[in-house]
Amino acid sequence: MDGRQSRLPRPENGVLLLDSHGSCRTPSGLRGAPEPLGEPETKAVPRSLGGSAAFLVGMTTHRRLAGLPSELKKIVGKAQVIQEGEFFEEHRKDMADYEGTPAVVVRPQSEEQVSAIVQLANRREVPILAWGAGSSLTGAVVRDGAIVVDMRRFDRILKIDPVNWYVDVQPGVVLDDLGNALKAQGFFFPPDPASSFLCTVGGAIATGAGGMRCVRYGTMKDWVLALRVVLPNGEVTSLGEPLPKNRAGYDLVRLFVGSEGTLGIITQATLKILPLPGVRIRRMLVQFADWPTAGEAIKGLRKARVVPDLLEFLDRETIAAVNRSFDFHVEEAEATLLVDLEEPSIPAATEVFRVHHALGIRPAADEAEADRLYQVRARAYLALKERASGIQIEDVVVPIDRLAEYLRFVKEVAARHHVQIPVVGHAGDGNVHPAILYDKADAKSREAATAAFEEICRYAIRVGGSVTGEHGVGSQKVALFRAQLEAHGGGESLRLMKEIKRVFDPKGIMNPGKYVDAA
């Protein structure tokens, strides 16, 4: 080893970063996910690598990254290559506080620029990942030592087609902005995750997001017609057609929906849209004495063939948190359902609620109150985050006929592990989100939260459910994702998924160490 090499700094966790001149530096105070709740975040270099092994990996990383900022500046301009400051720091953490320090953040504005950036990453074999708004809850958008491609400059709605009922949109468009533009022309886009005020179209597609209306309309996978994507080798291709029917070839569009940025970077999407409903929809607040009774009422709606437009569950602690954080004054009960119903369905639904001993059945007085009730649900996560230094949101799905049992089980888990677990979520399709609150500074609290998280996920697997309905796997649920496939006879499907990943990304640069790649 010559003198120049010996003066390279030792990598911290195997990661070497670059300063604005492309020189090597080590991150300060770098750490991964807040705690390994369910599955620890994959590191750039395993912690078991120590001494000379870690140093050699660090040297390889240094060679791959050397001069990278200068080359990126040639592609997008100096101002769009960021390596320090507030904007850079924003990309070190997702909404659930999983962390990873990028090598560099770059802000392209054209498909050609994205292609050139990906070609550069592929040539140098440097990890690369796309960033929408950072609203992931699973560690899917953070990684040490990666090129982070911030797609928010792709913020245009290109075309709203009122005859063929689709919209062409760039991936950086915020979902609420898309909704407002469509509403002005008499249309809407059904998927509406609670983070729609900041999450982007590209992020929602990559995550396979759902939302509050998914009980009637399904998730992102049901609403994406076509995509333009930059593949891991930098080539640009189109997938799908802006048509209601298209049987020409394998459905590669759906392969990208929910791929968590592991197969390519989306640069444009064609989404199905619908005319605004022609019938009047009423929002109702329905409250029960306990969680299982609310679960039985939801099962009763299914038996009565009532299909709500929205059916959300909130417990007392969640509503109390929102009331405190946002100065709302919504009545509290042990179990509350927020329900949207078309007027012809209201009598049948009301009868179901009465049979199941609802404490109160109250329609919103007007549009303003209906919006306020919606905001209680939309702001629930933000309010609960203020209740503890650590929060872990579950995303399991259980069959509807097991929902009451599942809610009872969550109560038992909370008592057994001495943790608070408020519950909120999409009760209408069995995708309710327990929110495990814990103290980051207390080892016993972290251990209890980890145990509760694991127990709830494995319960879902046991009753024929899934460990994730819409938030995805990321680095959080890798082992649990694998366990689900094995328990449900899908071991071979994991092998096929890994082969698909290798076909698309033979060098393994696209958001590595996440999802299928790590399972």
Image (spheres, rainbow, N blue to C red):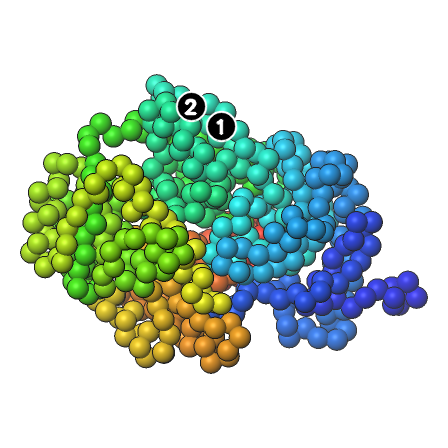
Question: Compared with residue 362, is residue 490 higher up or lower down, i.e. above or below?
Answer: below
Residue located at (70% from left, 53% from top): 103
For label 2, the residue is 160
* Outermost right residue: 3
Quarter holding residue 62: bottom right
Q: CA distance from mark 1 to mark 2?
A: 8 Å
The numbered disc on residue 157 is: 1
Q: Decide which of 136, 253 is in the foreground and name it.
A: 136
SS for callout 1: strand
Q: Residue at x 87, y 66 (%)?
A: 7
Say what amino acid the circle numbered 2 marks.
Answer: Ile
Residue contact between numbered discs 1 and 2, judged by CB atoms under 8 Å: yes
**Residue 378 coordinates in the image, percent (x, y):** 37, 49
Q: Position of residue 491 (x, y in %)?
A: 40, 62
In the figure, is residue 343 to the left or right of 111?
left
The residue furthest top is 163
Residue 163 place in picture, x, y as percent: 35, 19
Asked whether residue 468 appears in the rendered view, the answer is: no
